[in-house]
Amino acid sequence: MGKLITDGAVPKHEQLRSILQRLAADDLPAGAAIPSERQLMVEHGVSRITVRQAVGQLVSEGWLTRVRGKGTFVAHRAVQSTLHLASFTSEMTALGHRPSTVVLVRDECVPEPETAAALRLSPGETALHVKRLRLADGEPVSIDDAWYPSARLPGLLERDLSLSLYRLLADEYDAPVTRATQTVAAREAQADIATLLGTRDGSPVLYFDRVSFSGDEPIERSESWYRSDRYRVTMQVSSAAEPAAPPTASAPEREPATAS
């Protein structure tokens, strides 16, 4: 039997909202159904209006999601990232998520002119192509399609590419990523991207295009696509006269500088 809710200083719908939020945060996995309206009314001694107020708040806050004709379910909580330079693996671990990677492509070939220019390659020079699907807690979050200069990183494709490439670059090749330039745009997911991310064709995704450097030398050119419902980026901004404080990670979601 659930906790009966009584009149008090805190409105009934707020009391029920707190109960359901704890249920979604601690007891039920993402995708699990919450009790029906009728069951909540009986267990907590509240009206249908109170139930709908509480559930509606949690839906608007992203804790729950409604599926027409089926019910209300625990939503997949978005991965919350901040703007700083770190690998996907290390950031997800630091935020309490379980990162994993599926390697889709590992190849050496001549890249497109835009990528060759970004990596300062000579005409016809090859580069290492690594494409990976990144997951947090078993759920697809992003696709990373990256290129690296072959001459600088011999044997890279024989390494375990499911781990952090940034750590590998630093530890094995003495080429730590020290800075990056990046642009972010909103796009519609093409069919191949949507399939890999487990979403619908045309769904909104965040698109990142970045060039990473080790010192003054470009070491990576990458394109990434993120599910906008499972990944968010936070940042702190300030006026030109007042430098911004270092960014900090907020509650449970790669960042523009999180790729490999």
Image (spheres, grey):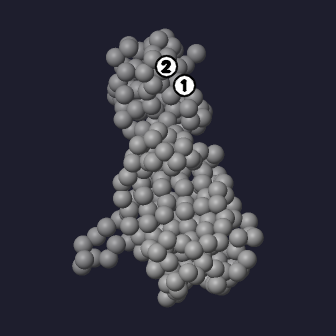
Residue at point 61%, 72% (across, down): 109
Q: Judge whether residue 166 can be spotted in this image.
A: no
Q: Which residue is mark 2?
A: 70
Quick one: quadrant of the C terminus?
Answer: bottom right
Quick one: quadrant of the N terminus?
Answer: top right
Residue at point 64%, 56% (across, down): 104
Query: In the picture shown, does residue 65 fall above or below 111?
Result: above
From the top left corner, tell me how far across and down residue 21 is, in percent. Answer: 48, 34
Query: In the picture shown, does residue 37 fall above or below 253?
Result: above
Mark 2 to mark 1 CA distance (whole Å): 9 Å
Residue at point 56%, 32% (across, down): 31
Q: Which residue is mark 1?
A: 33
Task: In the displayed orientation, state which residue is furthest to the bottom.
Answer: 216
For disc 2, the neighbor class at 10 Å (few under 14, some 14 to 19, many from 20) is: few
For disc 1, the neighbor class at 10 Å (few under 14, some 14 to 19, many from 20) is: some
Can you tell which of label 2 and label 1 is closer to the viewer? 2
